[in-house]
Structure formats: C-alpha cells, structure tokens
Image (spheres, helix red, strand yellow):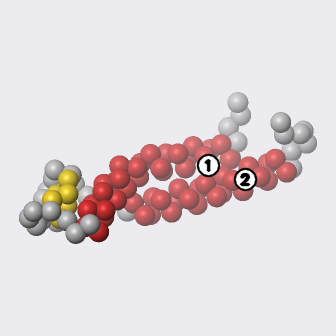
Amino acid sequence: MRLTLSRLLLLAMIAAIAVSWNPARRFFAADKCLDAGGSYDYGAARCDFDRSQPGPAASGVEQPTVSVSAVAVAALAVGVAAAGFTWRDRRHSSRPVV
C-alpha cells in the first residue's frame, strides 16, 4: 500500500483525535455537571450536588497543555484537507476507482 498525502493526512487526523479524546471527555463531563447545577470534583472526576468543590487548579489536577478546541479544529482541518486530496486523487486518476 502506497502512502499518499491523503492517507498521511488521515493518519494525522486520527492521531489528533486520539490525543484530544481524554481531555475532551473530561471537559464535557465537567460541563454537563455544571449545567445540571452541580459542582465538579476534578480530583475524583465526579459531580457533587451537596457541596462546592474547588476549581481544577486548586484541586491539583494537571491541566492539558494544548487546548481541546485547538486540537479539535486542527483535526477537522486535517480531515477536510484529506477529503479534498482524496477527491482530487480520485478525479485525476487514470484508472477507475472500484
């Protein structure tokens, strides 16, 4: 199998999603808790409706160094580029695509 630009971009998109998966999951868990009126315990990774919890910096939880949204945007851009290059490769291919 030949490593074309579209396959390389697809691999980069998969890597970006894999890197951002756990921080995104933690972010959405905290967001869901706060939307429901609770206080998110970052140390125990659970929602607490009984008492107020400190924020992530005060609880000693390591914060991701790369913004989750930045990684998501990068993965989307790589995916769009991969789709464009794949479409271009198939359009200009001399042999029929099966």
Indicate the quadrant containing the N terminus: top left, top right, bottom left or bottom right: top right
Local crowd size for mark 2, using a 10 Å CA cut-off: few (<14), some (14–19), many (≥20): some
In the rendered view, tell whether residue 2 sits above or below residue 45. above
Name the outermost residue toward the top: 1
Q: Position of residue 84 (x, y in %)?
A: 72, 56
How busy is the neighbourhood of tag 1: few (under 14 within 10 Å), some, or many (20 plus)? many
- Residue positioned 20% across, 53% down in the render: 46
Whether residue 7 is situated above or below residue 79 in the rendered picture: above
- Whether residue 66 is visible here, answered yes or no, is no
In the rendering, at what x and y percent does residue 91 appear?
85, 51
Residue 46 relative to residue 11: left or right: left
Name the kind of residue labelled 1 in the image: Leu
Q: Regarding mark 2 in the picture, which secondary structure is present there?
A: helix
Residue visible at 15% across and 59% down? 48
Examine the rendering and report whether any part of residue 70 can be seen: yes
Three-letter amino acid code of the residue under disc 2: Phe
Q: Position of residue 63 (x, y in %)?
A: 25, 58
Q: In the image shown, does 56 or 12 lie closer to the viewer?
A: 56
The image shows residue 69, relative to residue 18, as above or below, that is: below
Mark 2 vs mark 1, CA separation in Å? 9 Å
92 left or right of 30 in image: right
Mark 1: secondary structure: helix
Left or right: where does residue 7 sit relative to residue 52?
right
As drawn, which residue projects farthest toward the left?
A: 51
Mark 2 — residue? 85
Image: 76 above or below 10: below
The number of numbered badges drawn on the structure is: 2
Q: Residue at x 16, y 50 (%)?
A: 44
Is 63 positioned to the left or the right of 81 in the image?
left
Compare marks 2 and 1 and give the one earlier in the sequence.
Answer: 1
Disc 1: which residue = 9
The label on residue 42 is: none
